[in-house]
Amino acid sequence: MSEIKAILWDVGGVLLTNGWDHCERDELFRQFQLDRQAFEERHAEANDPWEKGLISADEYLNKTVFYEPRNFTQQDFLDAMKGQSQLLAHSAIRILAQLAASDSVQMAALNNEARELNDYRIERFRLRDYIPCFLSSCYVGLRKPDPKIFRLALDVLQRRPEEVIFIDDRESNASAASAVGMCGIHYQGPEALSSELTRLGVQPATR
């Protein structure tokens, strides 16, 4: 088994709640009294370019919400979107912090997120304290599970696939990382993750 030199972390579903998934959207549908079907039909087309950084939040919201007059502003809606982000109840952030303190492996984030939400979440939850490199979809123009985003991460980190762990709450994304030779871990809570890291020879600091 190769020595692990780097860990790539998903953010939503591993460290934090998801940025803009079904649960978050449901809450805002109720808050702003939006028609779910009308929104979801437009979201399906607009989300991919937004998460790839090809359009702004204003353009995304114009396509999905403000295609007709509303009694609230884009800023009202965007602020409410940001407000949905919380520390995940079963977060791996303690493991992340321990590994960052040990300085034993290279750390990076590899997540699908639109720029406005991603930037907010990095700042709000002080993720830069633990992760020095963010290979987010909005910065690199690629989204998981596209194999090109994993190969890009290997190029940026200058690591061989077998030296890299990728952690994601979606099994399909973990499998996509495994398909390019990484060790893909399907996140199922901090206890299971800690056990799997130990099995792979990665020992978080206990201080």
Image (tube, helix red, strand yellow):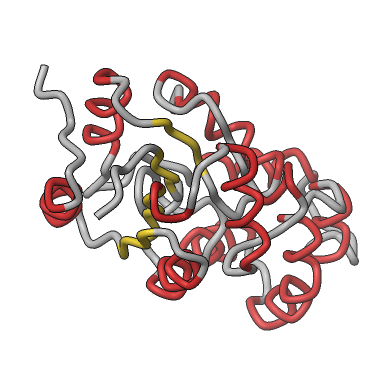
Q: Position of residue 186 (x, y in %)?
A: 31, 65
Residue ID at (26%, 29%): 99
Q: Residue at x 88, y 53 (%)?
A: 59
Classify residue 25 as left or right of residue 130: right
User: 67 or 123: nearer the eye?
Assistant: 123
Q: Given the current orientation, which residue lies at the most extreme front position?
A: 1
Left/right placement of residue 43 relative to residue 133 reads right
- Quarter of the rendering occupied by the N terminus: bottom left
* Image location (x, y in percent) of residue 173: 47, 68
Q: Which residue sits at x=9%, y=23%?
A: 206
Closer to us: 112 or 186: 186
Left or right, 43 with reference to 9: right
Q: Is residue 106 above or below residue 55?
A: above
Q: Is residue 129 above or below residue 67?
A: above
Judging depth in this view, the residue of 41 and 149 nearest the camera is 149
Classify the position of the C terminus by image quarter.
Answer: top left
Q: Residue 95's x, y, as percent?
A: 22, 35
All told, the count of numbered labels is 0
Please tell me which residue is depicted at 51% across the width and 24% down the height of the picture: 132
Q: Is residue 18 above or below residue 123?
A: below
Compared across the picture, whether 123 is left or right of 182 comes to right
| Quarter of the view holding residue 115 | top right
On the image, the x and y values in percent for residue 167 come to 37, 54
103, above or below 166, in the image: above
